[in-house]
Structures are given as C-alpha cells and as structure tokens.
Image (cartoon, grey):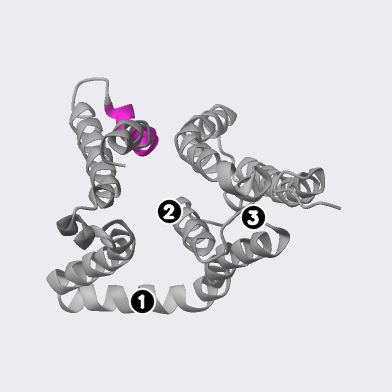
C-alpha cells in the first residue's frame, strides 16, 4: 500500500485521539457544573461563564487553524490537526516539523520521514506531562520566596526566563541572517515577516486602548499571525 500523508487511516487515528480529548473536556465540564450547583452558584452566572469562555476560545482556535493550514501543505492535514488539537505549542510544532523535514532526503515525504517528524514533534513537548506535575509546585515556591526577599530580583528572574524562551525562537529567525552580507536577500524574509507581525501586534495593542475596543487584545495573536502570513507572500516575492 502506497503511503500518503492524507491517508484515511491517519484521519481515523487522529479522530479517535481528539474524540478522547473532547470527551475528557465534556466530562470535566459536567463535573464542574454540578460542583458549582452544589456550592449554590447562580445558574445565570454559570451560563454566562460558559458562553464567554466559549467565545474567547475562538481567538486561540484561529491561531491553531493557521498553524494547521501552514503545515498541511507538507505534512498533510491529519498530523497537524492531531498535534495542534491536544498538548502542543504552535510555535514549537511548526519549527520542530520544518527543521526535521529539512534533514530528511529531498523528495516526497515517505512513511519513515513522516514517523520521524511525528516523533520529534511529540517527544519534546511530551516532557511537559512529566515535568509540570513534579516540579511546578517547587519552582513556584522558589519564585515566591525570591520575591519576598527581593521583589525586584524576582521580577528580573521571571523576565529572564521568558526572554530565554523567546530567544530560542528568535535564533530560528536570525540563523541565516549573516548570509545577507553575501547577497542572499532571502534570509531577510523571516526577519521582515516577524517585524510585520510585531507591528500588527502593537497596532492591536494601541487600538485596544480606544473605547469599546478592549476585545482587540483577545484577537491580537490571530491577527498578527494571519497578517504576518499574508504579508509573507509579497515579501517572499520581493526577496525570495
């Protein structure tokens, strides 16, 4: 049987896993609703909470959809749909998939290459399942202890950890930048796309300060993602 990244069996497997995740979500939603009623919470407040939460999931869902569409061209629909529908990170998954694919032999993605990409996308993110429940509580206690002793250094430490995470992705953007000095202008494409996305994010932040526009903050991420991808087309045509 010839391998295909969009083979029906892959959709069946992905569908089963995602159905299990959705079932788990519904289970805890029902348990939470029942517990809230036991505590005497008003039904109107519960309905408003559920509806508002459902509405605000649209923003991150759009971002995930963009990621699925971006990866679907190379890896089919089933794999990105599966990985970005459960535990995962849009930025991590795309970089892991594209970097791994870059080390595979040129040509169509065969079964072996497909499994390799799936393994890399899954293996790295799976550590969170183990590390979070074991170390999160002790790390939080350490951070709170540091903030009590010196609030300023506690804030610096938190900022440093965040910047450390961001720098890993910035390295991917600027890794080929030195080739610009030898005339390879295509290395400017990811830099300019990132800058365009950042400007869109800033614009969303400024618009959110206007009266009645606070909702813009919830949709800043998908706007910057979609806008950056859209601008990547003319930027690539110009420099690529």
| Range of magenta residues | 214-226
**x%, y% of residue 201?**
26, 37
**In this picture, is 23 found above or below 178?**
above
Between label 3 and label 1, give the one nearer the viewer.
Answer: 3
Q: Are marks 3 and 1 in contact (CB under 8 Å)?
A: no
Secondary structure beneath dot 1 equals helix
> Residue at image x 31%, y 42%?
240
Depth check: give the residue in front, 112 or 164: 112
**In this picture, is 123 found above or below 36?**
below
**x%, y% of residue 100?**
52, 64
Say whether residue 127 is magenta: no
> Residue at image x 51%, y 75%?
131
Tally of numbered tags: 3
Secondary structure beneath dot 3 equals loop
Question: Which residue position holds label 3?
Answer: 109
Secondary structure beneath dot 2 equals helix
Depth check: give the residue in front, 61 or 14: 14
CA neighbours of label 1 inside 10 A, class few (<14), some (14 to 19), many (20+): few
The main secondary structure of the magenta stretch is: helix
CA neighbours of label 3 inside 10 A, class few (<14), some (14 to 19), many (20+): some
Compared across the picture, whether 188 is left or right of 79 comes to left
Earlier sequence position, callout 1 versus callout 2: 2
**x%, y% of residue 13?**
78, 51
Depth check: give the residue in front, 93 or 45: 93
How far, Cα to Cα, is label 3 from label 1? 46 Å
CA neighbours of label 2 inside 10 A, class few (<14), some (14 to 19), many (20+): few
Question: Which residue position holds label 2?
Answer: 91
Question: Which residue position holds label 1?
Answer: 141
Earlier sequence position, callout 2 versus callout 3: 2
- In the rendered image, which quarter is residue 227 located in? top left
């Amino acid at each position: 049987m010839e391998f295909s990244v969009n083979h029906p069996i892959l959709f069946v497997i992905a569908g089963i896993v995602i159905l299990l995740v959705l079932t788990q979500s519904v289970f805890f939603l029902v348990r939470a609703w029942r517990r809230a009623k036991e505590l005497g919470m008003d039904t109107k407040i519960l309905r408003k909470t559920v509806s508002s939460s459902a509405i605000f999931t649209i923003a991150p869902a759009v971002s995930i959809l963009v990621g699925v569409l971006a990866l679907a061209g190379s890896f089919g629909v089933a794999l990105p749909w599966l990985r970005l529908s459960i535990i995962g990170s849009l930025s991590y998954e795309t970089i892991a998939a594209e970097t791994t694919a870059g080390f595979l032999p040129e040509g169509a993605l065969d079964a072996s290459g497909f499994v390799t990409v799936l393994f890399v996308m899954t293996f790295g993110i799976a550590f969170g399942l183990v590390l979070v429940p074991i170390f999160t509580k002790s790390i939080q206690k350490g951070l709170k202890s540091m903030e009590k002793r010196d609030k300023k250094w506690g804030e610096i430490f938190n900022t440093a950890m965040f910047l450390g995470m961001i720098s890993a992705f910035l390295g991917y953007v600027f890794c080929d930048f030195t080739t610009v000095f030898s005339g390879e202008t295509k290395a400017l494409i990811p830099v300019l796309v990132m800058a365009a996305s950042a400007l869109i994010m800033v614009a969303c932040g400024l618009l959110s300060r206007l009266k009645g526009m606070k909702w813009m903050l919830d949709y800043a991420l998908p706007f910057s993602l979609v806008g950056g991808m859209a601008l990547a087309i003319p930027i690539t045509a110009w420099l690529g």
